[in-house]
Amino acid sequence: LLVIIVVVAAWSVSRLMPVPKAERDALALMQQPTHFVGRNAFEALWLLDFDDVPMAERPGLIEEDRQRLAALAKQPLTDDHVQPMTLRAAQERYVSAPPLQPACRWTSDDCVAKLRADPASAEAALVGQQALLTRIAALSAYDHYQNPFTPDARAPMPNWALLQRSLTAHALAHVQGRSADALAGLCNDTRTAKMLMTHGDGLMPAVLGA
């Protein structure tokens, strides 16, 4: 009984104590909705997989997926009959970029050595990736990443792994003697990474940017 009284008394006193202004300001800052200025990269990243999607069609595809996710969010997470959303509107109408086992990944340290040993194979593998590589390069022109969809654990994410494919192209350019192009490509990707890391509205884009 004494322990309960002490706990209740401590809790009551702590509730009555004034919160320092610095803490109030910090809490108010964290409670503010995220607001970015400029071009949002979400649409480009959400549709990064798909070749030949006309610019005019993109907002409609995003809106279809937004409505699907909004309907999904109304169903309880505990319902065993509710399946995650695995199919996006663009998958029903457009062809995905060809698969690729990239010779270079963000965590690998033998990228250049692999390409020097067999540059022809890497060059042949990248032939079907040119449209995707163009879309990846274009991401550096965006200002921020903000997801407009209803938050839901069953919602898919952009195919972040695709962003690694440009690294193989840059390394191959260096191996083939086009080091200036390789460096320009790496700097371009770094601008995209900085945007995701510092002007994104979630943990995933920040981690990927880093």
Image (spheres, rainbow, N blue to C red):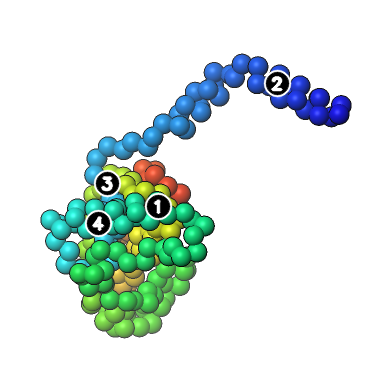
Horizontally, residue 27 falls left or right of residue 160, namely: right
Sequence-first disc among 2 and 4: 2
Q: CA distance from mark 4 to mark 1?
A: 14 Å
Labels 4, 1: front one: 1
Question: Foreground: 84 or 47?
Answer: 84
Residue 145 percent coordinates (x, y): 33, 47
- The residue at 27%/46% (across/down) is 40
The local crowd at label 3, few if under 14, some if 14 to 19, many if 20 or more residues have their Cα within 10 Å, is many
**Circle 2 residues within 10 Å: few <14, some 14–19, many ≥20:** few
Position of residue 179 measured from the top left corner of the image (x, y, whole percent) = 28, 65
Query: Which kind of residue does numbered mark 4 sit on?
Result: Glu
The disc at residue 140 is: none
> Residue type at mark 1?
Ala
Foreground disc of the pair 3, 2: 2
Cα distance in 3D space between marks 2 and 4: 50 Å
Of callouts 3 and 2, which one flags the residue occurring earlier in the amino acid sequence? 2
Tell me where residue 5 sits by quadrant.
top right
Q: Look at 17% across and 64% down and name the residue there.
A: 53
Q: Identify the residue position indicated by label 2 in the image.
A: 12
Residue that badge 4 annotates? 64
Residue type at the position of mark 3 = Asn
Q: Which residue is mark 1?
A: 73
Give the mark toward the camera: 2 or 1: 1
Quadrant containing the N terminus is top right
Total numbered circles: 4
User: Callout 3: helix, strand or loop?
Assistant: loop
